[in-house]
Image: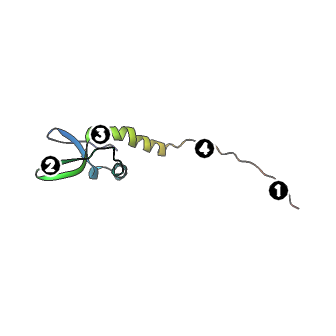
């Protein structure tokens, strides 16, 4: 499920801890998505990413990885019959 952006002072972002567990896991191991820190009411929210980067990652990486798992290609199995003679 794609999460909605949080907007603060015109910056749209998502924090990793607000994402579903499967997305958190994949993003934690992805160094291509830049992390940002945001100061909100004197508290630093770290480990966040800009929403545009999240939306791109979600569409181009996450959805493709999920669809390949959920819809595996058909595997053809050929069965052969072997005759074994009893001696």
Q: Which mark is first along the chain, 3 or 2?
A: 2
Q: Which mark is first along the chain, 1 or 4?
A: 4
Question: In the image, which is nearer the foreground, mark 3 or mark 1?
Answer: 3
Question: In the image, which is nearer the foreground, mark 4 or mark 2?
Answer: 2
Of 45 and 72, nearer the camera is 45
Tag 4 near tag 2, CB within 8 Å = no
Residue at the spot of label 2? 39
> Callout 1 environment at 10 Å: few (<14), some (14 to 19), or many (20+)?
few
Q: Distance between the residues labelled 2 and 1?
A: 76 Å
Count the marks: how many? 4
In the image, residue 10 lies at what x, y percent?
16, 38
Q: Is the image coloured rainbow, by chain, by secondary structure, or in one colour?
A: rainbow
In the drawing, what numbered circle is on residue 84?
A: 1
The residue shown at (48%, 46%) is: 69
Q: Distance between the residues labelled 4 and 1?
A: 28 Å
Q: Distance between the residues labelled 3 and 4?
A: 36 Å
> Callout 4 environment at 10 Å: few (<14), some (14 to 19), or many (20+)?
few
**Dot 4: element:** loop
Residue at the spot of label 3? 53
Tag 2 near tag 1, CB within 8 Å = no
The residue lying furthest to the left in this view is: 42
Q: Which mark is first along the chain, 1 or 3?
A: 3
The residue shown at (74%, 48%) is: 80
Q: Distance between the residues labelled 4 and 2?
A: 52 Å
In the drawing, what numbered circle is on residue 48?
A: none
Q: Which mark is first along the chain, 1 or 2?
A: 2
In the image, residue 3 lies at what x, y percent?
29, 44
Residue at the spot of label 4? 75
27 left or right, relative to 78: left
Tag 3 near tag 4, CB within 8 Å = no
The residue lying furthest to the bottom in this view is: 87
């Amino acid at each position: 499920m794609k999460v909605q952006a949080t907007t603060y002072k015109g910056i749209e972002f998502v924090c990793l801890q607000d994402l579903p567990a499967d997305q958190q896991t994949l993003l934690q191991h992805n160094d291509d998505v830049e992390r940002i820190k945001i100061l909100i009411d004197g508290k630093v929210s770290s480990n966040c990413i800009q929403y545009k980067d999240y939306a791109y990652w979600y569409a181009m990486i996450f959805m493709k990885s999920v669809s390949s798992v959920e819809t595996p290609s058909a595997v053809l199995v050929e069965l052969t019959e072997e005759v074994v003679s009893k001696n």
